[in-house]
Amino acid sequence: MIVNNRIIPGIGGNISIPSGQSSQGVTKPNSNFADIFNKTLFESKEVTFSKHAESRLKTRGIDLTEEQKSKLNDAVNKAGEKNVKDSLIMMDDIAFVVNVKDKNVITALNKEEMKNNVFTNIDGAVIA
């Protein structure tokens, strides 16, 4: 179907867009359902903490507020959008090493622990 001088393909045929409306919200025919589904699933999943990370949070006296957990989730989502696999996330004088695909915090460090430390096996960093 041609709308506003554009061909608009659809699933199983053509779709029409009312005059004066954009086709920006229309899924492209080459969009993969699994990709869209996985992205939505990834964004809805909350960050989890490995046993090691939970231990580090406890021994280092780091108590995260709900707001900080939300910021951490947002930072992990941003890293995921850039296809980062393992990320260093710096937030409020706390450093987290996160496996982005699994949304799993591997370890956490406070400001004192960060000094003179080298972070390895990461391919991206987010300052939140």
Image: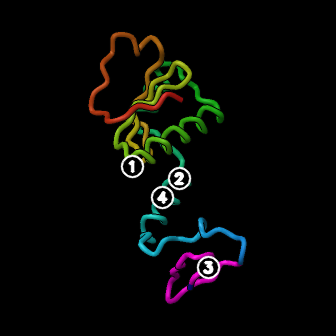
Query: Circle 4 is placed at which residue position?
Result: 39
First along the sequence among labels 1 and 4? 4
- Residue farthest toward the front in the current orientation of the protein: 5
Please tell me whether residue 12 belongs to the stretch shown in magenta: yes
Query: Circle 1 is placed at which residue position?
Result: 101
Q: Crowdedness of circle 2 by 10 Å Cα count: few (<14), some, many (20+)?
A: some
Query: Circle 3 is placed at which residue position?
Result: 3
Residue in the picture at 54% in, 41% down? 73
Q: Crowdedness of circle 3 by 10 Å Cα count: few (<14), some, many (20+)?
A: some
Residue in the picture at 53% in, 53% down? 43
Mark 1 secondary-structure assignment: loop
Query: Circle 2 is placed at which residue position?
Result: 43
Q: Which amino acid is tagged 2?
A: Glu
Q: Which portion, as a residue range, is magenta? A: 2-18
Q: Which amino acid is tagged 1?
A: Lys
First along the sequence among labels 2 and 1? 2
